[in-house]
Amino acid sequence: MQEPSYVLEISHLNKCFGTHEVLTDISFTVQTGDVTCIIGASGSGKSTLLRCINFLEDPTAGQILFHGRDAETQWKRAEYHAKVGMVFQSFNLFNNMTVLDNCVAGQVKVLGRDRKTAVQKSVQYLDKVGMAPYQNARPAQLSGGQKQRVAIARALAMDPEVLLFDEPTSALDPEMVGEVLAVMRDLAQGGLTMLIVTHEMSFARDVANRVIFMDQGLIAEDGAPSEIFTQPKQARTREFLSRVLNR
């Protein structure tokens, strides 16, 4: 059986919290090397979608396929989380560990790497995001932008095939946003498959090869950035973009 060309397939995904339906019939595929930005107003279901893809929330209905296999039943959860990594808006670093140990811990515990190999891999990625000089620091000693770069290095050290970013700059001071976006631009240019929930419209326009606009739990529009930003088909897409681009 030939393996599908896409790395992820989201099929008819629904998510309810009690009687409130947050996601309705979400379906799309992610090709290897895609940089997909998910945009939309607060409360449109963007972050819930990522959390379902990573099984931090259990979908109410539908299916998530990774390399054509059901991610819920045909992949070990730890193995799936290693291959489909996530970077959170609140960093989620361990405050009682150094920067280096934050990056080493998952490799040793989940991937079974020996510490020497894990340290080498961690330093490689900390250097890539400009944080190698801070490897012995604790998260409390870092700025928000530095913490987020460490979180990205930690995710990369697991050698993921896909990296999910949940509003990675929303908790940062404005002057720190650029340093994190610069790292993400480099990752995109390096061919990493990325699925990014973001409010950074210029980043989505310039870096993504695909933009998904969500509205009230639905995919309202899906296309190339040039289409979405210059010739959106839906009135609600036009309304959203005019509001956020004219602030």
Image (cartoon, rainbow, N blue to C red):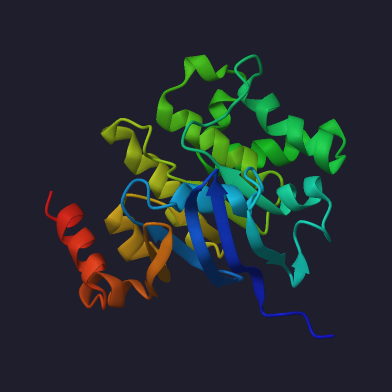
Quarter location, residue 236: bottom left
Q: Residue at x 43, y 55 (%)?
A: 185
Residue at the farthest bottom position: 1
User: Where is residue 133 shown, x and y percent of the image?
Assistant: 55, 27
Q: Position of residue 56 (x, y in %)?
A: 64, 42
Residue 204 at what x, y percent from top left?
35, 60
Q: Position of residue 124 (x, y in %)?
A: 65, 42
Query: Does 202 sit left or right of 163 as displayed?
Result: left
Q: Who's the residue at 78% across and 68% down the image?
A: 69
On-image quarter of the N terminus: bottom right
228 relative to 176, above or below: below
| Closer-to-camera residue (60/167) | 60
- In the visual, does 211 lie left or right of 192? left
Residue located 48% across and 64% down the image: 35
Q: Nearer the viewer, residue 72 or 33?
A: 72
**Vertical position of residue 70 compared to residue 179: above or below:** below
Furthest residue in direction left, as rendered:
246
Residue 13, picture quadrant: bottom right
Nearest the eye: 7 or 173: 7
Q: Residue at coordinates 52% horizontally, 41% vertically from top-left?
A: 129
How many numbered circles does the render carry? Answer: 0
Residue 184 visible to the viewer: no
Asked if residue 10 shows in the view, the reply is yes
Instruction: Answer with left or right where residue 102 lies relative to residue 68.
Output: left
